[in-house]
Image (spheres, rainbow, N blue to C red):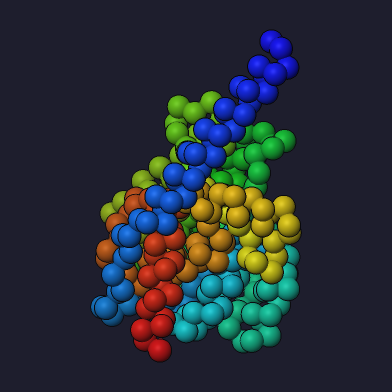
Amino acid sequence: MRIPRLRNVLATLLVLFAAFYLFGAVSLALRDDSIAVFAGRPASLETIAIFGASGTAGDGILKAAMAAPEVRKIHVFTRRATPRIEEGVASGKVQMTLHMDYLDYAAIREQIAEVDAVFWAIGISARGVDETTYGMIHVDFPRQFVEAWTGISEKPDISFHYISSSDISEDSSMMWAREKVRAEKTLFGFAENTNLRVIAYRPDYIGPTEEEAHIGQDMLYGFFAPVGAAVRATQIGQAMLEITARGGEFENGDKVGTWNIRRYSDAYEQRLIDTG
């Protein structure tokens, strides 16, 4: 293929990509299906727990929870402290507990017994990790926790909010996608006929909080967000808070994708404005 012809082909592909991208961005900007502000009595959110607060998603969830007026106590279970966690501890709102074994929760029974909702953000990249290790972290860790939690909680309604991923399938050729589906099915199945509801969040790209993001992450977020393929980690936290507050509107096994994460985050912010 001659060079001029190759250039023409590449230019055509670039123009087509730009057209599709622009169409997606405009369609998203014009889309109007905002969620009505919740007017009922919010479900209890006084005491929550966050696992994985030292990671990208967990940091955003913690930031949102620290700013939430309805949350009075946040239990953070972590292997290491971060500036955000330390800030929360200094404010008196966060109680940090160093916890190392995520297959055994006997040492934190007292703390988790008082929790109304759990926001779970523990996870690792699949790069360089074998399937057994990946499955232990993404399936066994949360499965062992919900078994321990439901065994001691006396609250009539508790909820577990699990960060999964978009584009996952049992038939996927990607190990991580199959394991994320297995995690969802395991947790949903365990919660059937119990006082527990498990909600799975399936975001596309997760942008760190603005103060934590480096320039590359900001560029990725800036590219994907206009076409609805990215959320800020803080938006995930706000969506979790809003969905928890809405209680019975959500059932065990519900899945919340990127677009709905953004919608419930917006509804949460509007509710805060309306309630002053």
Which residue shows up at 45% across the image and 34% down it? Answer: 169
Q: Is residue 92 visible?
A: yes
Residue 205 left/right relative to 271: right
The image position of residue 47, as x and y in percent, is 47, 77
The image position of residue 180, as x and y in percent, is 50, 41
Whether 4 is drawn above or below 225: the answer is above
The image position of residue 172, as x and y in percent, is 49, 28
Residue 194 left/right relative to 268: left
Most foreground residue, 84 or 8: 8
Residue 192 left/right relative to 2: left
Q: Is residue 110 visible?
A: no
Where residue 31 sits, quadrant-wise, is bottom left
Most foreground residue, 153 or 269: 269
Which residue shows up at 39% across the image and 64% down it? Answer: 264
Where residue 157 sits, quadrant-wise, is bottom left
Quadrant of the snapshot with the N terminus: top right
Whether 216 is drawn above or below 117: the answer is above
Which residue shows up at 64% across the image and 50% down it? Answer: 220
